[in-house]
Image: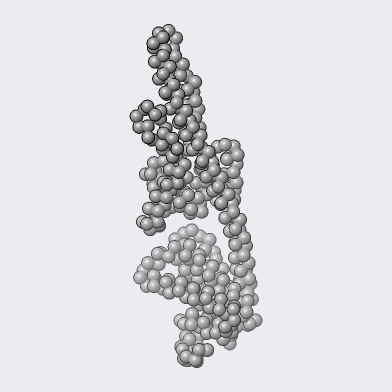
């Protein structure tokens, strides 16, 4: 989905006073961006029944924990009530149930109800031939019914106005968010491009592993998510092999301790490379922090893989791992010598 186009559609429908279409456009944007809270709210506006909201959003929200799901349903209902609760009773003060202040109406019904109830008021005329007593009784009943209908018409107009404001504010919020994301995306693209260019010149092995991981990151398939996790680990190990190849003998590290920096100790080899070549510089401290984050990520992957629950890592987490990898490699390659450590 072209999110920018969809946000523009919200503004277009609001300008045309088409509140149902604007609400549907907001729902599309919310679901596409996995904004579950607003998606549930706009769904309630289209389908006020709770069961419909839960059924439609099931596929989108089934990965959420029970607490998160309850939060979405509870707070989306609160937002719906803010729109549909009036400051006055919705029936004539002499009628039963005169304390009801919430009008349950779907967005798609607002315009038709405004027309229908307006027509009802216009048709409330006494039939010909009534006696004076009957005419007075009809007039009294009609006035009470007109008063109730006008309260409902006023409530419908209020709900429509409130919902237009909600849609407008959501469109403005998403427009700003998309602009910010575009700027961040441009920055991440620059980082990724610089890293790819470095390894294209210095290590084809790392370059091709990064390319494969980037291709997998663009897929929504669950199997590709698992493969992405593996490629992130392989790319990081390949980078370690490039900067600090494995040693077959014990190595006295920068901190004075002896370690076996063998093939499988790629995280330790990267830490030693940073200590030797970047030391206590600001760039070195940043690279170490980024590597620690990656190391924690890799440990979690290894733990999940050993338990046979690889798919417990979400697509967003896998992509975040790839972003962290590129940020780490960007910091390292900016200060790396022109050829690898021998």
Residue 198 appears left or right of 275? right
The residue at 40%/67% (across/down) is 310
Check the picture and name the quadrant holding the C terminus: bottom right
Colour scheme: one colour
**Residue 19 percent coordinates (x, y):** 53, 38
**Residue 110 percent coordinates (x, y):** 48, 34
The residue at 40%/64% (across/down) is 312
Name the one closer to the observer, 92 or 59: 92
Q: 279 above or below 184?
A: below
Q: 10 above or below 258?
A: above
**Residue 208 percent coordinates (x, y):** 56, 71
Name the one closer to the observer, 122 or 91: 91
Total number of numbered discs in the rendering: 0
Name the one closer to the observer, 46 or 161: 161
The residue at 40%/20% (across/down) is 141
Residue 293 shows in the view: yes
Q: 240 above or below 86?
A: below
The residue at 36%/56% (across/down) is 66
- Quarter of the image for residue 332 reads bottom right
Residue 25 shows in the view: no
**Residue 257 percent coordinates (x, y):** 47, 90
Name the one closer to the observer, 99 or 115: 99
Outermost residue to the front? 93
């Amino acid at each position: 989905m072209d999110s920018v186009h969809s946000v523009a559609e919200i503004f277009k429908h609001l300008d045309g006073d088409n509140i149902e279409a604007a609400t549907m456009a907001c729902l599309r944007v919310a679901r596409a961006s996995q904004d579950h809270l607003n998606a549930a709210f706009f769904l309630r506006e289209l389908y006020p029944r709770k069961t419909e909201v839960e059924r439609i959003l099931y596929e989108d929200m089934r990965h959420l924990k029970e607490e998160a799901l309850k939060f979405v349903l509870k707070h989306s209902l609160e937002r719906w009530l803010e729109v549909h609760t009036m400051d006055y009773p919705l029936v004539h003060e002499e009628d039963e149930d005169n304390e009801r202040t919430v009008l349950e109406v779907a967005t798609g019904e607002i315009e038709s109800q405004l027309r229908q109830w307006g027509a009802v008021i216009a048709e409330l005329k006494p039939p010909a031939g009534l006696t004076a007593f009957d005419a007075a009784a009809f007039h009294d009943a009609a006035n009470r019914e007109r008063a109730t209908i006008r309260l409902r018409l006023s409530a419908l107009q209020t709900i429509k106005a409130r919902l237009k404001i909600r849609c407008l504010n959501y469109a403005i919020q998403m427009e700003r968010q998309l602009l910010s994301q575009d700027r961040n995306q441009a920055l991440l693209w620059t980082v990724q491009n610089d890293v790819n260019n470095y390894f294209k010149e210095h290590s084809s092995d790392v370059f091709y592993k990064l390319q494969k991981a980037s291709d997998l990151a663009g897929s929504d398939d669950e199997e590709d998510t698992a493969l992405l996790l593996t490629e992130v680990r392989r790319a990081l190990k390949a980078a370690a092999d490039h900067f600090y190849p494995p040693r077959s003998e014990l190595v006295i590290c920068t901190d004075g301790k002896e370690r076996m920096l063998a093939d499988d100790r790629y995280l330790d080899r990267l830490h030693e490379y940073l200590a030797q070549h970047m030391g206590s510089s600001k760039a070195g401290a940043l690279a170490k922090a980024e590597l620690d984050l990656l190391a924690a990520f890799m440990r979690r992957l290894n733990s999940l893989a050993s338990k046979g629950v690889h798919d417990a890592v979400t697509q967003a987490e896998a992509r975040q791992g790839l972003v962290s990898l590129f940020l780490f490699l960007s910091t390292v390659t900016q200060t790396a010598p022109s050829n690898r450590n021998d």
